[in-house]
Amino acid sequence: MKILTGNDLRSGAVTWWTGTGWSLSVDDAVDVGDAATEILAREEAARRVNVPYAIEATIDAAGHVRPAHIKDRVRALGPTVRRDLAVPTAAKTGWDWVI
């Protein structure tokens, strides 16, 4: 599964491509497949997001999108060492924070 991420230009918040726009929740991310390059070019030109890029991800048994690389997991969920700093939507899911 390939999903898109970037940072919101106004707030700097991590965002995820939903198929029609950008969301703060990684669970809203959709598989873009081979369309990644086209969507990235269009969204960067529209200046809705800063430096968007494609990443690999999976969907776990509970249906949550989980970035494949630890860097993007931290961007999606928050630090692995302090649950009190978790991204609010991730904190609600009860995801396992161990790497």
Image (cartoon, helix red, strand yellow):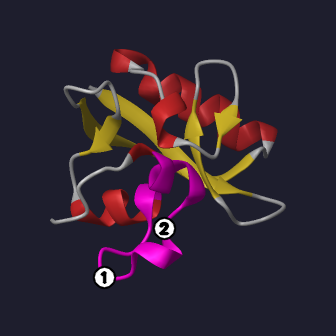
Q: Which residue is mark 2?
A: 86
Is residue 12 left or right of 14 when viewed as pictured? right
Who comes first in sequence, dot 2 or dot 1? Answer: 1
Between 35 and 23, the one lying in front of the other is: 23
Secondary structure beneath dot 1 equals loop
Query: The residue under label 2 is which amino acid type?
Result: Ala
Residue appearing at x 22%, y 31% in the figure: 60
Residue appearing at x 57%, y 32% in the figure: 17
Q: Position of residue 97 (x, y in %)?
A: 25, 63
Between 83 and 50, the one lying in front of the other is: 83
Q: Position of residue 47 (x, y in %)?
A: 79, 46
Is residue 98 left or right of 74 when viewed as pictured? left
Secondary structure beneath dot 2 equals loop
Query: The residue under label 1 is which amino acid type?
Result: Val
Of the 4 image quadrants, the one containing the C terminus is bottom left
User: In the figure, 98 relative to 67: above or below?
Assistant: below
Marks 2,1: beta carbons within 8 A: no
User: Which residues make up the magenta segment?
Assistant: 76-92
User: In the figure, 4 relative to 35: above or below?
Assistant: below
| Residue 88 within the magenta-colored segment of the rendering | yes
Instruction: Tell how many labels.
Output: 2
